[in-house]
C-alpha cells in the first residue's frame, strides 16, 4: 500500500518555475544534467528539508525530464516521498551497504543513475563546492567520457530573487522571530540562568506565531555580559545580573526559510556609549533600507550605512549584511562596499548591523528585508529599540 504523502509547501507550478530557470542556465552552459548536492538548493528545487546531507545524496536535474530525480540513503527515501513534489519513481534509495564503505558510497549510486540514463557522454554540471575531494575525483574518473563543469553557484544565484510565495513564507518566519524576541524581554531577568531563558525563547521559536509553528530549530546565539564582544557563542551556565547586557541573534524557520533578527537588551540602564552606538546604528539602518532600491548595488546600501554611522562617531569593520533565504545565509551577494551586485525586486537580505569594538564592547540590531522599488521593506515588526528590562 503506497505511503500517504504530506501536504506540499508550494504548489507544483512553483517548483516547475524554479526548475525552468535552472534548465535555462544549464542550456546556456551546455549542461545536459546537473548534480545538485547543496542541501539548501535541493530544498529549493524539490521541497525536501530532511537532514540527510550527512551522507552522499544528490538531486539530478535533466533537460530531458520534467521532474528531477533524487538519490539518497534508502532509510531517508520515505522523507523524500513525503516532502518532495516529484513522482515516487523519481526517489531512489541506495542500499545500506554503501554506508561507511571505503570502496563504494552514495556518490557511486548517483553516478550509476547518470550512466543508466545514458548521460555518461554528455555535459554534466556538478555542485563541487561542498563535495569532498575524493568524491570529485570519483566523478571525474567514472565519468571520464563526459564534459564535467563546476556549477556550484548556478542554483544559489537563481534562489536570490524570491517569488511572492517565498516572500509570504519568509514573512511567517519573521513573525516567529518577533515572537521569540518578545519572549526574551519577558524571561530575561536578574538571577535567571542563560540556559533557562534560552530554552523559553527556543520553545517560542518552535511553537511559532499566528498559528504557524516553526518547522526547524536554527542557530541561536545569546552573548551576555561579560561576553558581549563575541558574536557566535551559545548560552552558558551563568545567570543574568543587574547591569547585564544581552545580545541576541536567532530566527524563526518555516519550511527551511528564515528571517533572522538581532536585538540588544539591557538589565537596567545601558552605558552612555552603548546608547550612542545604538542611536548611530538605527540611523544607519534606516539609511541602508532607504538605499536598498531596485537597480542600486549592494555597495550602495553598505555605503549609506557606513557614512551615516561615521557621522555618529563609530565605524563597523564587518559587512553590513548578506543574502538570506533557505538555511539562513545564501553565499552570494554581500552588503559591503565593493560588491557590485545589482539589487533586483524581491531579493532578500539580512541587514546585520552587529558591531563589535575591541574586546569589551558589542551591540547588535538587524532587520531582514526584501528589495522593492521604494527601498528595503523589513519583514519583522519589532521596534528598533535598545530594550531596557
Image: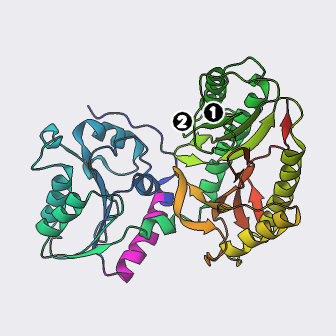
Q: Residue at x 17, y 53 (%)?
A: 109
Q: Residue at x 78, y 22 (%)?
A: 189
Q: Residue furthest front?
A: 359
Identify residue for label 1. Answer: 205
Q: Residue furthest left?
A: 103
> Which secondary structure lies at badge 1?
helix
Marks 1 and 2: CB-CB under 8 Å? Answer: yes
- Residue 156 at x, y percent in the picture: 47, 64
Q: Residues within 10 Å of mark 2 (few under 14, many from 20)?
A: some
Q: Residue at x 87, y 40 (%)?
A: 271
Task: Indicate left or right for 228 with 95 as reference.
Answer: right
State whether residue 363 appears in this view. no
Identify residue for label 2. Answer: 217
Q: What colouring style does the render use?
A: rainbow
Viewport quadrant of the N terminus: top left
Tell me the chief SS of the magenta region. Answer: helix
Q: Residue at x 12, y 46 (%)?
A: 102
Start-end of magenta stretch: 15-30
Task: Indicate left or right for 215 with 107 as reference.
Answer: right
User: How far apart in space, not on screen, are marks 1 and 2 (Cα)?
Assistant: 7 Å
Quick one: label 1 or label 2, which is nearer the N terminus?
A: 1
Q: Quadrant of residue 368?
A: bottom right
Amino acid at each position: 500500500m503506497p505511503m500517504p504523502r504530506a501536504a506540499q509547501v508550494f504548489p507544483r507550478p512553483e517548483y516547475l518555475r524554479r526548475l525552468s530557470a535552472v534548465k535555462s542556465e544549464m542550456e546556456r552552459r551546455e549542461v545536459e544534467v546537473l548534480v545538485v548536492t547543496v542541501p539548501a538548493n535541493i530544498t529549493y528545487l524539490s521541497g525536501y528539508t530532511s537532514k540527510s546531507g550527512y551522507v552522499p545524496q544528490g538531486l539530478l536535474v535533466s533537460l530531458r525530464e520534467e521532474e528531477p530525480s533524487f538519490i539518497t540513503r534508502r532509510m531517508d527515501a520515505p522523507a523524500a516521498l513525503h516532502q518532495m513534489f516529484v513522482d515516487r519513481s523519481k526517489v531512489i534509495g541506495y542500499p545500506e551497504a554503501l554506508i561507511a564503505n571505503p570502496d563504494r558510497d552514495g556518490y557511486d549510486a548517483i553516478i550509476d543513475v547518470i550512466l543508466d540514463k545514458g548521460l555518461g557522454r554528455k555535459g554534466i554540471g556538478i555542485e563541487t563546492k561542498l563535495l569532498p575531494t575524493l568524491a570529485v575525483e570519483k566523478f571525474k574518473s567514472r565519468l571520464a567520457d563526459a564534459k564535467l563543469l563546476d556549477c556550484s553557484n548556478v542554483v544559489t544565484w537563481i534562489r536570490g530573487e524570491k517569488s511572492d510565495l517565498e516572500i509570504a513564507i519568509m514573512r511567517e518566519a519573521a513573525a516567529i522571530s518577533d515572537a521569540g524576541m518578545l519572549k526574551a524581554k519577558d524571561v530575561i531577568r536578574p538571577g535567571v540562568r542563560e540556559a533557562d531563558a534560552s530554552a523559553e525563547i527556543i520553545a517560542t521559536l518552535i511553537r511559532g506565531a499566528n498559528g504557524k509553528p516553526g518547522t526547524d530549530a536554527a542557530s541561536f546565539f545569546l552573548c551576555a555580559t561579560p561576553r558581549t564582544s563575541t558574536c557566535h557563542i551559545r548560552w552558558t551556565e551563568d545567570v543574568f545580573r543587574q547591569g547585564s547586557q544581552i545580545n541576541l541573534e536567532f530566527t524563526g524557520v518555516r519550511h527551511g526559510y528564515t528571517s533572522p533578527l538581532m536585538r540588544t537588551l539591557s538589565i537596567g540602564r545601558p552605558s552612555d556609549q552603548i546608547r550612542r552606538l545604538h542611536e548611530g546604528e538605527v540611523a544607519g539602518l534606516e539609511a541602508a533600507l532607504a538605499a536598498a532600491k531596485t537597480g542600486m548595488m549592494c555597495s550602495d546600501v553598505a555605503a549609506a550605512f557606513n557614512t551615516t554611522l561615521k557621522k555618529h562617531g563609530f565605524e563597523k569593520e564587518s559587512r553590513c549584511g548578506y543574502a538570506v533565504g533557505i538555511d539562513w545565509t545564501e553565499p552570494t551577494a554581500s552588503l559591503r562596499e565593493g560588491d557590485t551586485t545589482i539589487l533586483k525586486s524581491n531579493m532578500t537580505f539580512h541587514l546585520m548591523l552587529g558591531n563589535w569594538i575591541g574586546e569589551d564592547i558589542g551591540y547588535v540590531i538587524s532587520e531582514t528585508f526584501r528589495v522593492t522599488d521604494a527601498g528595503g521593506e523589513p519583514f519583522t515588526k519589532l521596534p528598533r529599540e535598545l530594550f531596557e528590562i
